[in-house]
Each structure stands twice: as C-alpha cells, then as structure tokens.
C-alpha cells in the first residue's frame, strides 16, 4: 500500500478537510480525495466522518493514525540515512514544548550543527505535547518535569531552583527588607499565590512545604505565570516561579529559598523506539551541554 495514501490520510486527519490537506501537501484536492477513497475502499473501513467540508476521524481512523504517522516517520528516517550519507543536510525536525524556555537555545545549538534542517515548534500544555509525541506529530518534546512511561525516553536538560517574588511595597517585602534569601518557614501563614493543579512548579513547592510542615495561605489559585505576575503586581500575595522563568522587574523583590528545597527540571523526550534514529539522536547530541 502506497505511503502517499497514508500521507494524505494523516494530512486530512490533522487539518480536518480535503482542501486544507491539499494545500499542506501541495497537491490537488481531487488527488487527496482519490487517495482517501482508495484507502477506504481497499480496507473496506470508513476512516472519516463527513460533515460538509469538515472531516473527523472515525474510531478506526483514530486507531490507524498513529500507525500511519509511525510509517511516515520511518520513511523519513530511511531518506535521511540514504541522502547525503546521513548527514542531515536537509529535512524537518518537529519539536513539541510547553513554553519557550530552553527551547530557543536548543534550536540554536541544533541549527549550528545542521543549518540546512527545517525546524518547527508546536506549543501546548504537557498533556498535548506528550500526545503529539506519541502520535508522531512531533519528533522530540521539551517539558518541565519527569513523566515515567515505558514508551518514553527522557533526558534531563537543566535544573532550576524555585524562587519567590513579591511587590516591593508588600508587607512581606518590608518584613524581610535586608534579606535576599529566606527560610521556607517564612512562608508560614503568608498568602502564597498558587498555580493551577498539575503545575510542576506548584507540585515541587507543595512537596517542600509539606516536608517542612509549613502552612501558608493558599486560597488564591491562578492559572498561568502571566496571571501570577499580575496578581503580585497588584499586591495580592507572594508568587513562586522557576528561576529560569523569572523576568526581572524593579517593582518586585526577589527571594531565594535557603537550601533551594524546591526546584523544577526541564527534560527532553522522545519515543523509546526512536531513541537511536538518525533524526532524533542528532537532536540529543546537539543539545548536550558538554558538546563541542
């Protein structure tokens, strides 16, 4: 069965219509329609629900998608190996990430080694980024925190302490006016602005607080770094953020926590079965901190 049909199938699944898939693959819409129809006719399975111009996967289509994407990834790997003696002078590497931190420096390191490669970055939350990786929509993923799954390979890239920040006119800032570092116990009874459930920063800080028996006020939950920053600017409480993500501001006071009991770590992921592939391994080699 031709991989062109699987390529058309994956494109329609991703873009949701024949016309959008045709534009993405630089083919005519009748060509895409014919490839999908042939695939369904030969398999005797309906792969898409048609609702006007929109097309959504059936249950069988959803099961086929990761297999089709895996086949296409393997085809690309074969092309990389055979072309230019496997030196990756051209091609595409797709990266998933939960945020821009570290990803830009990784891209710079990779481009320095492989300037002819095209790179794309797809942003999303942790669940979306991992799902994209497992569906072969991306080749590698950059996430905060360790997700231990048998099908995934993870490598730690960087580790950063969690720091506290507060408006400089807030009573907490005045109480610790001479300090640049404070014990975790200083948060006892203070209003601590909490990230949403599932945040790696929140989880790491909560673990440290629990271990030391510290109980701040945590009745204000805010769902993003930007919203936390705005709440701190309005004097609503104390914010916590990974040191790598903090943006300096003269209106804020920053405090390190004695002994750095809470930290976040950035990990780079790939599918375990692709760990040794030319494309994926080239990325891990390029971002090694001790690489030339």
Image (spheres, rainbow, N blue to C red):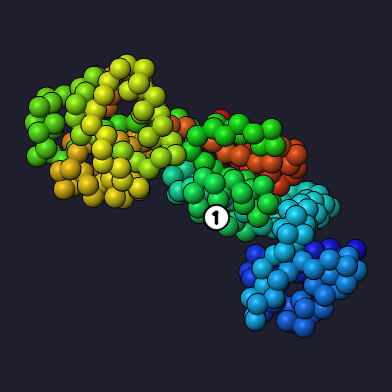
Query: Visible in this render: residue 124?
Result: yes
Tell me: 40 left or right of 182: right
Where residue 27 appears, as percent x and y from the top left, is 74, 78
Name the element at disc 1: strand
- How many badges with numbers are in the image? 1
**What residue is drawn where x is 74% and y is 49%?**
87
Which quarter of the figure has residue 185?
Answer: top left
**What residue is drawn where x is 77% and y is 66%?**
47
Which quarter of the figure has residue 42?
Answer: bottom right
**17 relative to 249, above or below:** below
Q: Quadrant of the C terminus?
A: top right
**What residue is drawn where x is 26% and y is 46%?**
229
Query: Visible in this render: residue 109?
Result: no
**57 relative to 82, above or below:** below
Where residue 26 appears, as percent x and y from the top left, is 70, 76
Please name whichever residue, 105 or 100, is drawn nearer the observer in this view of the structure. 100
Where residue 272 appears, as percent x and y from the top left, is 71, 37
Q: Quadrant of the N terminus?
A: bottom right
**What residue is drawn where x is 54% and y is 43%?**
142
Tell me: 133 left or right of 198: right
**180 relative to 236, above or below:** above
Where residue 184 appears, as percent x and y from the top left, is 26, 21
Residue that mark 1 sits on? 121
Tell me: 282 left or right of 196: right
Which quarter of the figure has residue 286?
Answer: top right
Are there few (<14), some (14-19), or many (20+) residues within 10 Å of tag 1?
Answer: some
């Amino acid at each position: 069965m031709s991989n062109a049909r699987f390529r058309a199938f994956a494109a329609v699944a991703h873009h949701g219509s024949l016309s959008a898939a045709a534009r993405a693959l630089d083919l005519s819409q009748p060509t895409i329609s014919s490839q999908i129809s042939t695939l369904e006719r030969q398999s005797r399975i309906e792969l898409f629900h048609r609702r006007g111009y929109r097309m959504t996967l059936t249950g069988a289509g959803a099961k086929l998608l990761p297999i089709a994407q895996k086949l296409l990834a393997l085809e690309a790997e074969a092309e990389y190996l055979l072309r230019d003696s496997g030196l990756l002078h051209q091609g595409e590497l797709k990266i998933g990430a939960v945020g821009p931190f570290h990803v830009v420096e990784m891209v710079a390191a990779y481009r320095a080694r492989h300037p002819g490669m095209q790179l794309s970055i797809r942003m999303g939350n942790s669940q979306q980024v991992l799902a994209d990786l497992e569906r072969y929509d991306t080749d590698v993923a950059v996430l905060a925190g360790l997700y231990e799954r048998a099908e995934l390979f993870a490598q730690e890239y960087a580790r950063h302490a969690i720091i506290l920040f507060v408006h400089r006119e807030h009573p907490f800032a005045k109480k610790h006016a001479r300090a640049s570092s404070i014990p975790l116990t200083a948060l006892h009874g203070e209003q601590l602005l909490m990230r949403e459930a599932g945040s790696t920063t929140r989880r790491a800080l909560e673990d440290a607080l629990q271990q030391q028996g510290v109980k701040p006020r945590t009745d204000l939950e805010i769902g993003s770094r930007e919203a936390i920053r705005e709440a701190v600017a309005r004097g609503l409480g104390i914010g916590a953020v990974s040191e790598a993500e903090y943006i300096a501001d003269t209106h804020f006071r920053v405090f390190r926590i004695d002994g750095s009991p809470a930290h976040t770590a950035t990990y780079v992921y790939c599918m375990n079965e692709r760990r040794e592939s030319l494309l994926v391994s080239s990325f891990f080699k390029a971002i090694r901190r001790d690489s030339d």
